[in-house]
Amino acid sequence: MRDTADVVLRLDAITKRFGKLIANDAISLSLRRGEVVALLGENGAGKTTLMNILFGQYTADSGTVEVFGRVLPPGNSRAALDAGVGMVHQHFTLADNMTVKENISLGAQPLFALSMKNSEITKKIKKISDDFNLKVDLEARVANLTVGERQRVEILKALYRDVKILILDEPTAVLTPQETDDLFATLRLAIANGLSIVFISHKLHEVMAISDRVSVLRHGKLVAEVDTADTDKEALATLMMGTGAVAPDIAVATPGRDLFSIKNVSTPNIGSIPGLKRVSLNLKAGQIVGLAGVSGNGQAALADLVAGLCTPAEGTIEHHGDPVKNWSARDAVNKGIARIPEDRHKTGTIADFSLTENAILECYNSDDFSKSGWMYWKKARAFAVDIIDKYDVRCPGPDTRIRLLSGGNMQKLILGRVLEAAPDIVLANQPVRGLDIGAVNYVHSQLLAARDRGAAVLLISEDLDEIMRLSDVIHVISGGRLSPEFLRGTKSPSELGGWMAGQGFDEQVTHAS
């Protein structure tokens, strides 16, 4: 029997419904001082909902939350914060128009209390930043940060409040493996000093590395609790899904002609984020081109260029061998370029639109869904229902506002929207970020299927394992420069890591052959 003397958190029979959907079904779990409990489950299993109830952002229909022996009032985030509970959200909760330092310190003390001096705030944040190796410019405006930098700010924001219980909802989704290792090393120091953590992740190797126990949710119910030392990744995947996870087989590609090319293209820097530096790249029919790199090294500029969201300062673009002028997002859509954007919230969906409306965002003016300004909503709804069924989007229905979905289920809808249009060119920017292992395998199988039917796929990912597994050829981007082309299997992870760190680039600007 477990020692319960050091229990700092207890959830008792938590139930939460959204209409007919039961997100949490009488879930009970506990957390002890200095312990890490991993919360696992497929997308839509109810993990984030449960943590939002703990943090006071949702109110449970029934059940209680007890922190350090005291029952918290439901739906009260301030009470949770005052009790020592902090949360790093899967979806960013930052003010874009404020600086990093302002975001971190905002709300950390009562409005009318004597404020800390600016120098004291800076000193405290810098100490936490150094201790946890979460480097970020404190004076930078959040709107100008990369996705990876924003995630670091979220973590700093929680740690700044001297929390005793920390909820980490997909905290490493946008961190590099090295950054993740550094974060875990410093988290272990905090754990040794009594910090307790609820860790939500779909990366099973991370769960095995950092957690003491694992609680598994499936379809809103707690189906298993195991000690990490008594299990393995394969067993956890089976508990999550109810069946084993099988990665797709990858056949040898048969590349065809160039469908999209950029030649000696440069784009302006945006603040501290580098633009492209005389980059050349060919996307061929029937081939997946992988782009590896540490966040903030020019991936966003390249993705925006392919999607028509920016134009070259110099260099040329070709589509099917023909030069393109006045490149725009409309041109990209009309020329069959479909995109899975990096940020599904900011640029991939419209939060208050329904799933149906979001499903047709980039094809609403096609003959399938409109004519002479009139929308065929019945057809649009049927299209959304088809995506929901094919891609296992867990939701109440096609009329649901997409902001009510988990991040993974949003991603599935975007994937379906892209691939059901059978595009010639697929821009897949971080396509499996935040997805469970079953969904990851499904996304990978769909990208491979698109390749095998003749589409050109540009895969941008900070997950080097994903790049090395799926890509037929690999480029590395660093400081806006592009490495030569590497065929699958010709470079080791450490060799690619060297290029990611900037090694291997000549003083002259290097571009792909």
Image (cartoon, grey):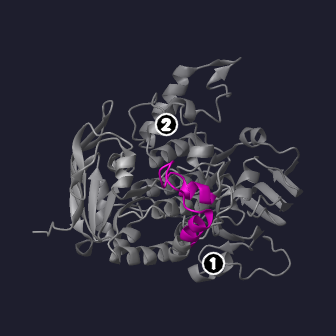
Position of residue 275 relative to residue 21, above or below, is: below
Measured from the top left, where is residue 5 in percent x and y? 16, 67
Q: Is residue 394 left or right of residue 337?
A: left
Position in image of residue 54 (x %, y %) = 32, 50
Instruction: Indicate the quadrant containing the N terminus: top left, top right, bottom left or bottom right.
Output: bottom left
User: For residue 299, which quarter of the picture?
Assistant: bottom right
Whether residue 243 appears in this view of the structure is no
- Precedes in sequence: disc 2 or disc 1: 2
- Circle 1 sits on which residue? 496
Asked whether 123 falls inside the magenta stretch, the response is yes
457 within the magenta span: no
Q: Residue 323, labelled with which disc?
A: none
Q: Which residue is mark 2?
A: 402
Which amino acid does the dot numbered 2 rest on? Ile
Q: Which residues are magenta?
A: 100-126
Residue drawn at (52%, 20%) of the image: 378
Amino acid type at image mark 1: Leu
SS state under label 1: helix
The correct choice, above or below, for 428 with respect to 196 in the image is above
Q: Quadrant of the C terminus?
A: bottom right
| Image point (33%, 58%), residue name | 40
The residue depicted at 40 percent of the width and 37 percent of the height is: 395
